[in-house]
Amino acid sequence: RQELVQRGLTLATTLNDVMADPLYFSDVDDLDDLAQVVKGQTDIVFVHVFRPDGSLLVSTEQGDYPEGFVGGPFASDALRQSQTLHWERDQFLEFASPIQVGADTIGGVHFAFTTASIDGEVATLTRWRIIQSLVLVLIGTIIAYGLSRYFIKPLRVLASAARQIASGNLEFSTANQRNDEMGELAEAFTQMAASLKEAREERMIQHSALNRAYEQMRALSARLESVREEERATVARDI
């Protein structure tokens, strides 16, 4: 709307410069032609040219020989304050400006822009921003889902592998098709499980060897005890 306000202020200044000649100002036909030209500009709704007492001299709404006075106190305030005023009402941005020759006010001009097109552009822009926001949210959701599958799924696999190791199950392997840090960590888990399995098998072999040695020692001890008993029996017979 700031651009529309600036456009209205510029138009008010231009109209003051054109209408400031009292002789030209008294030519109603030329004033009406000028008002029609202004009315033909984009977004202009109406143009009123009025006398110092507020009575209408030219009106694009009434045609030739307009009657009545310019509506509302707004236009008279512009004459009294000797400056261009503007205000927004409904879907209109209205301007009122005095027409002055030096310090004398010889009349005024009152015109309005419609803000419907601007409101439509704002509504369209708002809709596009909403759509863009929804698209960004959707893209963010897809990216978040992809990242979660990329990072969370391998972490769950590693957590499962840790539980398998903790429960003593070393007969597993993490499927690793990645070449990043997660892949290296999964490979480390697989190697750790293999190392633990190998150490457990070696420990079982050592335990089995110890059992065999123990059984051999028990057999040897029994044999020695049997030999001693035989010797004692032989000595007793000789006596």
Image: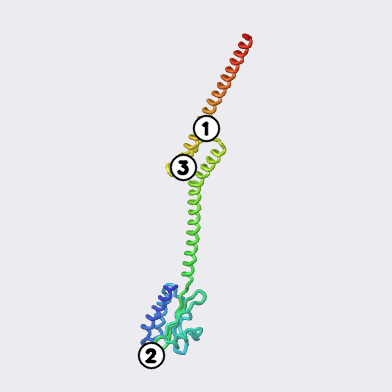
| Image quadrant containing the N terminus | bottom left
Q: Residue 185 has which mark? A: 3
Instruction: Say whether disc 1 or disc 3 marks the residue closer to the N-terminus.
Output: 3
Q: Classify 238 as above or below 36.
A: above
Neighbour tally class for label 1: few under 14, some 14-19, many 20 plus, Cα within 10 Å: few
Q: Secondary structure at mark 3?
A: helix
**Which mark is on residue 103?**
2
Q: Nearer the viewer, residue 157 or 228?
A: 228
Q: Badge 3 local density, few (<14 within 10 Å), some, or many (20+)?
A: some
Q: Are marks 1 and 3 in contact (CB under 8 Å)?
A: no
Query: The disc labelled 3 sits on which kind of residue?
Result: Leu
Label 3 or label 2, whichever comes before in sequence order: 2
- Number of other residues with Cα within 10 Å of mark 2, as a class: few under 14, some 14 to 19, many 20 or more: few
Quadrant placement of the C terminus = top right
Q: Amino acid at mark 1?
A: Arg
| Of marks 1 and 2, the one in the foreground | 1
Marks 1 and 2 sit apart, C-alpha to C-alpha, by 109 Å
